[in-house]
Amino acid sequence: MGKGNSRASKKRAAKKAKAAIKSGNAVIDPSSSVVANVVSTNNSKGGQKMSLWSDDDEDEIEDEGEDQTPLTTPLMKQSPKAPSSARPSASDDASNNATNDATNDATNDTSDGDSGSDDDVDMEVAEGEEDPSMKSVSGTLLSTLLDPIPPSTFFSTYFEKKPLHLVRSDDPEYPHDPFLTRKDVEEMLLRQSLRYGVDLNVTNVVDGVRQTLDLLPSSGGDPVVAESKDVMSNLESGCSVRLLCPQMHSDDVWELCSILETTFGCMVGANAYLTPTASQGFAPHYDDVDVFILQQEGKKRWRVYPPLKGEVLPRTSSRDFREDEIGKPVLDVVLGEGDLLYLPRGWIHQAVTTREDTHSLHLTVSCMQDWSWASMLEEVLPEAVKRACAGAGAEGEGMRAGMPRDFLDYMGVMHDNDWAIKDVRRNGGVVENDEKTKVRKRTQFRKLLKAKLSLVVDSALRLADWGADEMGKQFLWDRLPPAYSEEEKADTSDGQPGAPIFPETMVRISRDGIARVVVEGDKAVVYHCGDNDRKYHSNPLSPLDFELDDAPTIECLFKTVAPRWIAVKDLPHPPAEDFDDKVDIVKALFEEGIVAIRQVEGVRR
């Protein structure tokens, strides 16, 4: 459950996004301008700054036909008034590829919460209702962070493809209000018992090599709690301090990450880096996550290098590189306060603070870790093999049949002479009969293997929904607990403990995407992130079991998202419309914090 969150400045990006939506400015329109609702569209003040590679640089990159030019552009200044006829949206043209299609769906909520519910289910928006869906809130937050680049352009042109650099620091009217400050970090060190290697690292780079100065625990002991004076002394000596999970200790960072998880449909995390002047904390490297670098205080110079051949969108982070291994940077920029730099995973980077400021503090927001088609296939294929083998017919029997008795006599690397035989034939030589027999058997073996694989592929395709549910369950365990606003919390069991449920009680999921119903055996099982802690995987998932005939009720509830509500009496529960069952389901989900309720005026109490 959300444990409360501070009401940050209205200028803060997350708050601006919420305020823009909750101002009641008409309805969501996917064709409307995203930027116009948050910032001025006047581009006369400086235009765009382009940072283009030379032709020689482009030739060195395996771009597969994609334009990989990183863009540098100034942020347009904050508009004093949003247009009264539009509400921010995150409409996206996802024509590039299927991956973008899936990603953009998370930002393109144009239904005002009507998420595929049956036509005969009576959903309604309460009079005066202004609650936005979380997809709208998240899309607007992303619009604010990326302004003036619309999310549609970001996803089609930059996401997982190339860097994006947005300049705000040269606009004196930009209302920069950081999510995190040096004072916040110092307060954490004093009050939160941060531990070396768990909550923070102290590092520097000497002669191009990273050094970690964390105090190590004694053999078998607990991690050492960092003393504030020791950490600050290292900072003054030129070391960098990295906070590994600032969202555990900062409500603003927690809210930022929690909201963005809706846009990206995967876990969003954060690190914070506090570095003294003219210092470098980390050697050149690439990450296994896409990162948004938000400069909070001071300035920092970033040099960015294209991915190495075969290491585009890597699934693991790299080792530290030497300067002579990475060549010349394709992007060399200084981030000032309020600037943003997006880097897809695999892009090598290094950063050093400038001599102009006393320190630099930046926040790195990350996503897409181990969240790829490969991740999906790793879930589906083992189960597909099991199910292909389980059939009672000839196909299942064929999968379970033994291997050819002599296959080790002609298969394996030591028997792979195919290339040599082709060479002999090409040069007019004679291939011995034993070798011809071996070639024939190897060819037949591959045909048999291909036939078995086709059965597994058919099985895997039938498991598409199952695989999606498995990844959905993983996401619910990985992600942060919802950072509820005070308004959201008022409708949950935190705000209404022990509230009664009546036929006319209006209900909906407390925040879209925080729960999922799956079928396991003869049960409908609800997984949710409401019991998660801000500390990663601190709490196990706590699923709720229901009868299978309860599933339509739960599905309808989970598809009823803000601003929609539905009365308990209108929830479907076939085959028999059992009101008591509906009440029990709503009550269980409400007590778990998954469902929000509002009582209708005039209903008996």
Image: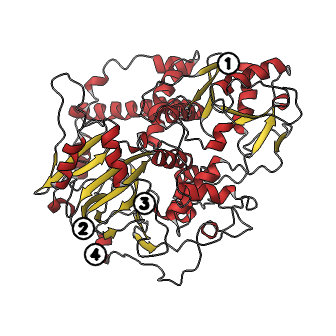
Q: Are marks 4 and 2 in contact (CB under 8 Å)?
A: no
* Distance Cα–Cα, label 1 vs label 2: 59 Å
Who is closer to the viewer here, 295 or 576? 295
* Amino acid type, callout 1: Phe
Mark 2 / mark 3, whichever is N-terminal: 3
Residue 511 in view of the camera = no
Q: Any mark on residue 354, and which?
A: 2
Who is closer to the viewer here, 48 or 460? 48
Q: Nearer the viewer, mark 4 or mark 1?
A: 1
In the picture, the quarter occupied by the C terminus is top right
Q: Are marks 4 and 3 in contact (CB under 8 Å)?
A: no
Which residue is under mark 1?
A: 546
Counting every numbered tag in the picture gives: 4
Neighbour tally class for label 2: few under 14, some 14-19, many 20 plus, Cα within 10 Å? many
* Distance Cα–Cα, label 4 vs label 1: 62 Å
* Distance Cα–Cα, label 4 vs label 3: 19 Å
Quadrant position of residue 299: bottom left
* Amino acid type, callout 3: Lys
Neighbour tally class for label 3: few under 14, some 14-19, many 20 plus, Cα within 10 Å? many
State whether residue 561 is above or below residue 132. Answer: above
Q: Residue at x 25, y 34 (%)?
A: 225
Percent coordinates x, y for residue 385 in the rendering: 48, 25
Q: Any mark on residue 161, and which?
A: 3
Is residue 461 left or right of 524 when viewed as pictured? left
* Distance Cα–Cα, label 2 vs label 3: 28 Å
State whether residue 485 is above or below residue 523. Answer: below
* Amino acid type, callout 2: Thr
Q: Residue at x 16, y 43 (%)?
A: 213
Which residue is under mark 4?
A: 56
